[in-house]
Amino acid sequence: MPKKSRIERTVVLRSLRAGLAAASTLSPRLAGAGAARLFLSTRRHPMAEWERARLASAHPSRLASPWGELVVWAWGPEGAPAVALQHGWEGRGRSSALSCRRWSPRVFG
């Protein structure tokens, strides 16, 4: 998907703000629910080929949390010292593989 230009993003955001402002005069609760849904819905990014290659060498597992199940990816030999990396909002954990490669060339070769 092509990246949107700055002008397109500005138009979309201004339209969204105007729509939420209009909705809030009719129903503040509905406008609040719509704004919360937009804020809490993250975008999915297409997976790049290098990400597929890195994930192919990882060991996936799942972890229970109060907010639902978390996916965990591990690289390197079992029992080796571990480093936990966490991605940011709308980030992707698989992008951490690049950092892991820089920090541990023995694991990634």
Image: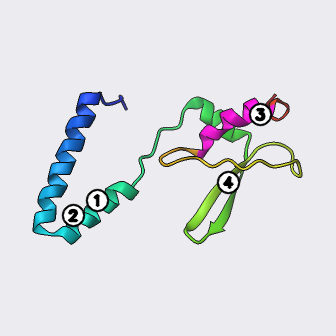
Q: Which residues are magenta?
A: 93-104
Q: Residue flagged by tag 4: what amino acid is it?
A: Val
> What residue is disc 2 on?
31
Please tell me whether mark 3 sits on a helix, a strand or a loop. Answer: helix
Judge whether 75 appears above or below 60 on screen.
above
Please tell me whether mark 2 sits on a helix, a strand or a loop. Answer: helix
Q: Earlier in the sequence, mark 3 or mark 4?
A: 4
Q: Are marks 4 and 2 in contact (CB under 8 Å)?
A: no
Q: Of residues 101 and 7, which is closer to you in this image?
A: 7
Q: Residue flagged by tag 3: what amino acid is it?
A: Trp
- The label on residue 103 is 3
Q: Residue flagged by tag 2: what amino acid is it?
A: Ala
Q: Residue flagged by tag 1: what amino acid is it?
A: Ala
Percent of width and height locating residue 5: 29, 27
> What residue is disc 1 on?
35
Label 4 or label 2, whichever lies nearer to me, is: 2
Instruction: Determine the CA span between mark 1 and mark 3.
Output: 40 Å
Q: Earlier in the sequence, mark 2 or mark 3?
A: 2
Instruction: Determine the CA span between mark 2 and mark 3.
Output: 46 Å
Instruction: Determine the CA span between mark 2 and mark 1.
Output: 6 Å
Side of 2 where 12 appears, left or right: left
Q: Residue at x 61, y 60 (%)?
A: 70
Numbered circles on residues, count: 4
Q: Of residues 59 and 9, which is closer to you in this image?
A: 9
> What residue is disc 4 on?
72
Instruction: Determine the CA span between mark 3 and mark 4.
Output: 18 Å
Q: Earlier in the sequence, mark 1 or mark 3?
A: 1
Q: Residue at x 37, y 32 (%)?
A: 1
- The label on residue 15 is none
